[in-house]
Amino acid sequence: MEADKIVVNKLKEHSRLSGDDIAEIRTFSFAPRELADHEDLIRQGDEPDRTVVVLSGWVARYHLLSGGGRQYLSFHMAGDWPDAQALFLERMDHAVCALGPVLVAGIAHKELTRAISRRPSLGFAIWRETLIDAAMFREAITNNSARTKPARMAHLFCELFYRARALGHVRGDQLQLPLSLIQLGEALGMAIATVNRTLVELRASRVVDFRSGTLTVHNWPRMCAIGDFDPGYLHLKPPR
Amino acid sequence: MEADKIVVNKLKEHSRLSGDDIAEIRTFSFAPRELADHEDLIRQGDEPDRTVVVLSGWVARYHLLSGGGRQYLSFHMAGDWPDAQALFLERMDHAVCALGPVLVAGIAHKELTRAISRRPSLGFAIWRETLIDAAMFREAITNNSARTKPARMAHLFCELFYRARALGHVRGDQLQLPLSLIQLGEALGMAIATVNRTLVELRASRVVDFRSGTLTVHNWPRMCAIGDFDPGYLHLKPPR
DNA sequence: CGAGTGATTGACTGGTGTCAAACCCTGTGG
DNA sequence: CCACAGGGTTTGACACCAGTCAATCACTCG
């Protein structure tokens, strides 16, 4: 699918776009860029002059820790704007890397701000996009601070599966999710041994199976119950 | 200080405001509201039609947990916009409550969006305000997931002290911070016993003392070192 | 076929949550 | 003026979760 369609689809999930807004999006010159597994798209401290939309594959945002480790903050799939905030926060306070091979489209900040001043409602949609990001971060605070380890993991799976389904990336009960256990641990704030033990536990209860980059959901309602998942914070329009 | 001055001061921390922007802010009809300790300003699930600026005192944002507990997400002082995101996210995914007696000023969403469409640069400043919020949430994820308990607590103290100092709320090495240990624990994801033990530890090392609603910083550089604090994520202009 | 990365499992131990009791302070009412 | 209640704080005892370390296994790639 072409970049403009992906963008329109995504923004329509939470915002109303007029014909003029969509026409404006079509004028963007989407600069494509391919990334290899593990490659950094943007580094902490960078001052990018363009923003990025994911066209295929997954990217992750992460903090570099003083000890050299990472704290993963969020995961993004085709349609997402993983660094929209850079439009108005000059210096990156976190990095963005590729999980597996990735295709992205770059939009120059200048082009974007010009479009926004021409069509404020388009700006509001992108603003809303960054606000939903913030809501996901809030949920991650709660997830990693207040929930048990199995709930924590189940909740992350719920969020990713729910978001991916809304964007049409789920096939049956399966989602391609190229994450290692190490990365999962660095996202959820748990040691790799615990990650594995929790994974085994969820697998044994026939709720969800995550292995070799594939997430298989056997029992969606129970996974939501275990993860205490309520999708309200994603602020998406209810699925038709 | 009057509401408009407080707002201008705050936005100037990170954004450039033109004379016209400031004039626009002066036209707002700030509806004052007083709150008692512990009172909810906004509840999870609400759909507010006005946004709020803190004029004096502290408010906190929190998630209501399924078990009835709370996860505190952020703390806000005079100048902050604790629910700016509600401008474009209709339904609140979290609540806002008062810590001690609080005075706030309400601005109707209608008035705000009208002002933004008249003066886009003012909108960008408020957008930036919400983006800095998101950056603080990201930092909180890392804090509560990847840092040791003492580091976690020190980092929170660093952030609050730094932000408060930038806004002129710090007197000498002291900051009024009406938080109970329970609330501190519900913010940092630690049990109250651990909160107290960590507090005792920090006190004993003569770095920082928090008791009965007063934070006293004895050794700022060491507190930053313990908390692994780098204020870059707050995206404030460097203090003159 | 060997090297390297990631997954899996077991053993061990320290940190931290839970529980409980005592303490302190403040406000209230007799 | 004192007794009491109640909320918050402080401290100790204890159990267990989960982090660390290490060994093994599975798989891919050169």
Image (cartoon, coloured by chain):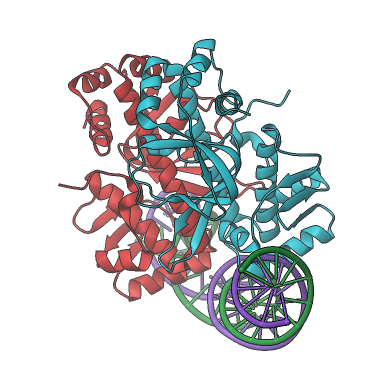
Chain colours: A cyan, B red, C purple, D green
Identity of the residue drawn at 59% across and 31% down: A235
| Picture coordinates of residue B44, whole percent (x, y) | 57, 35
Whether residue A153 is visible here, answered yes or no, is: yes
Q: Nearer the viewer, residue B156 or A100?
A: A100
| Picture coordinates of residue B189, whole percent (x, y) | 53, 58
Identity of the residue drawn at 59% across and 49% down: A101
Quadrant holding the N terminus of chain B: top left
Is B195 located above or below residue A115 in the figure?
A: below
Identity of the residue drawn at 21% across and 18% down: B20
Identity of the residue drawn at 47% across and 68% down: B148
Q: Nearer the viewer, residue B40 or D24?
A: D24
Q: Nearer the viewer, residue A225 or B209?
A: A225
Image position of A69 (left or right of B24)? right
Q: Nearer the viewer, residue A36 or B127?
A: A36
Is B132 located above or below residue B201 in the figure?
A: above
> Residue B24: which quarter of the image?
top left
Numbered label tally: 0
| Picture coordinates of residue B106, whole percent (x, y) | 38, 25
> Residue B10: which quarter of the image?
top left
Question: What residue occupies the far left of the structure in this picture?
Answer: B240
| Picture coordinates of residue A199, whole percent (x, y) | 74, 61
Whether residue B40 is visible here, answered yes or no, is: no
